[in-house]
Amino acid sequence: MITTFLSQREVPKQEIKNLYKNRWHVELDFRNIKTTLGMETLSCKTPEMAVKEIWVYFLAHNLIRILMAEAASLADIVPRQLSFKHSLQLWQAYRQCPFDASDRESLLELFHMIEEKVVGNRPGRIEPRNDDRSLTRY
């Protein structure tokens, strides 16, 4: 890994691994916002409205992440282990169904369906969110 640190001993290797992992999560989040939520092309015509449109995408992303966090909490796993796309698709299907806002049972069913899709470990790919072994060479 190439860094701008002048000395190898200046920053511990574990700290560099953690920085890389955090950067990877940011990349995944941007990909989810742009591709999965559909923000590749903004539809607004003015800069002010484009900023508002971007904020709506960020809000939608965070709302799906909240659903994932709730589901992960019930399953006793880390939210990053869950599929963002799967969670979004389930939410879109769930909101199409008529439901009572006080119906906790249907919401729990949604959380259980979200927790069923755990992100898999795909051999040969560097995916820091799956485990730390992919970072041992750095």
Image (spheres, helix red, strand yellow):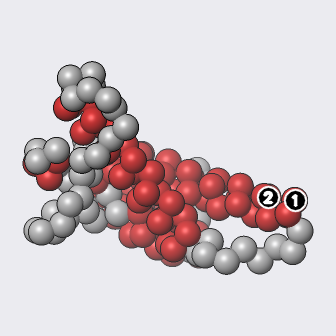
The quarter of the picture where residue 21 lies is: top left
Residue 67 image point, x, y percent: 47, 52
Residue 5 image point, x, y percent: 33, 32
- Residue 28 located left or right of residue 10: right
- Residue that carries the numbered disc 1 in the rendered image: 48
- Residue 98 located left or right of residue 31: right
- Residue 130 located left or right of residue 26: left
Assign a secondary structure to mark 2: helix
The quarter of the picture where residue 117 lies is: bottom left
Residue 85 image point, x, y percent: 42, 69
Q: Residues within 10 Å of mark 1 (few under 14, many from 20)?
A: few
- Asked if the residue at tag 1 contacts the one at tag 2, i.e. Cβ–Cβ closer than 8 Å, the answer is yes
Q: Residue at x 36, y 52 (%)?
A: 24
Residue type at the position of mark 2: Lys
Q: Nearer the viewer, mark 2 or mark 1?
A: 1
Q: Residue at x 82, y 73 (%)?
A: 44
Q: Residue at x 20, y 23 (%)?
A: 9
Q: Nearer the viewer, residue 37 or 41?
A: 41
Query: Measured along the vertical axis of the image, is residue 65 above or below residue 40?
Result: above
Residue 35 seen by the camera: yes
Residue type at the position of mark 1: Glu
- Residue that carries the numbered disc 2 in the rendered image: 52
Residue 71 seen by the camera: no
Assign a secondary structure to mark 1: helix
Q: Nearer the viewer, residue 74 or 133?
A: 133
Q: Residues within 10 Å of mark 2 (few under 14, many from 20)?
A: few
What's the distance in space between the residues labelled 2 and 1, CA to CA? 7 Å
Query: Measured along the vertical axis of the image, is residue 67 above or below residue 119?
Result: above
Where, quadrant-wise, is the C terminus in this rendering?
top left
Residue 60 image point, x, y percent: 61, 59
* Residue ranking furthest to the front: 6
Q: Residue at x 61, y 75 (%)?
A: 40
